[in-house]
Image (spheres, grey):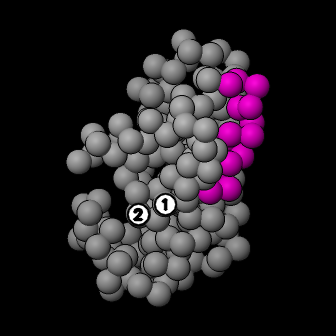
Amino acid sequence: MLRRLYDWTMGLAAHRHARPALFGVSFIESSVFPIPPDVLMIPMVLADRAKAWVIALVATLGSVLGALLGYWIGAALMDTVGQWVLTAYGKETAYDQLAARFTQYGGWAVLFAALTPFPFKVITIFSGAVGLPLPAFLLTSILGRAGRFFIVAGLLWRFGPPIRTFIEERLGLVFTIFMACLLGGFIALRYL
């Protein structure tokens, strides 16, 4: 089933309604959909590199608005829809542990998930469930998602098809290492 969703998403990239489709995929990926918008965004940028920034903006807007849906699911529907999504991503047993940490590091968790391959929808739902302040949630969602999509678009715009393999295979790791270093730096400053 996941392979069919992936193939369907890739097929949307060549469609004349690719931008609205990217907005839609970005929107639902932030709350329930398992396929990241990068799968659609990468071929779209490669097909028309001059529109890389517009494509990144569409993905960012869709993703941030979808993050608000995820936040609402966590705030209003945690016992039903929220629990189902967390179970689907294998995070149902981690709720209590993550909720305790979220109180202290919620904004950083949102930023980390927005930039990395970690399922963003899990963090959007957790944010609503634990009552992360909406302004902090929105700010970190915008910064993280814009950072992710504009970096991918910028790399594709600059380097074209040769960078595609790097992005698809290693960019998540690079973002994860970057965020670990950033968070480690803040922790070191606080305790040293």
- Region of the chain picked out in magenta, as a range: 48-62
Q: Position of residue 2 (x, y in %)?
A: 27, 46
Find disc 2 in the rendering and name its residue: 32
Q: Which disc, if any, is residue 28?
A: 1
Q: Amino acid at mark 1?
A: Ile
**With 27 as the anchor, is 157 left or right in this view?**
right
**With 138 as the anchor, is 42 left or right in this view?**
left
Task: Identify the residue at horizontal 40%, vertical 47% (top origin).
Answer: 35
Task: Identify the residue at horizontal 38%, vertical 42% (top origin).
Answer: 8
Q: Position of residue 68 (x, y in %)?
A: 59, 71
Q: How many numbered circles does the render carry?
A: 2
Magenta stretch holds residue 61: yes
Task: Identify the residue at horizontal 41%, vertical 26% (top origin).
Answer: 169
Magenta stretch holds residue 110: no
For the residues marked 1 and 2, what is the alpha-carbon distance in whole angstroms? 6 Å
Q: Secondary structure at mark 2?
A: loop
Q: Position of residue 84 (x, y in %)?
A: 29, 73
Q: Position of residue 137 (x, y in %)?
A: 62, 69
Q: Is residue 28 above or below residue 177?
A: below
Residues at marks 1 and 2 touching, judged by CB atoms closer than 8 Å: yes
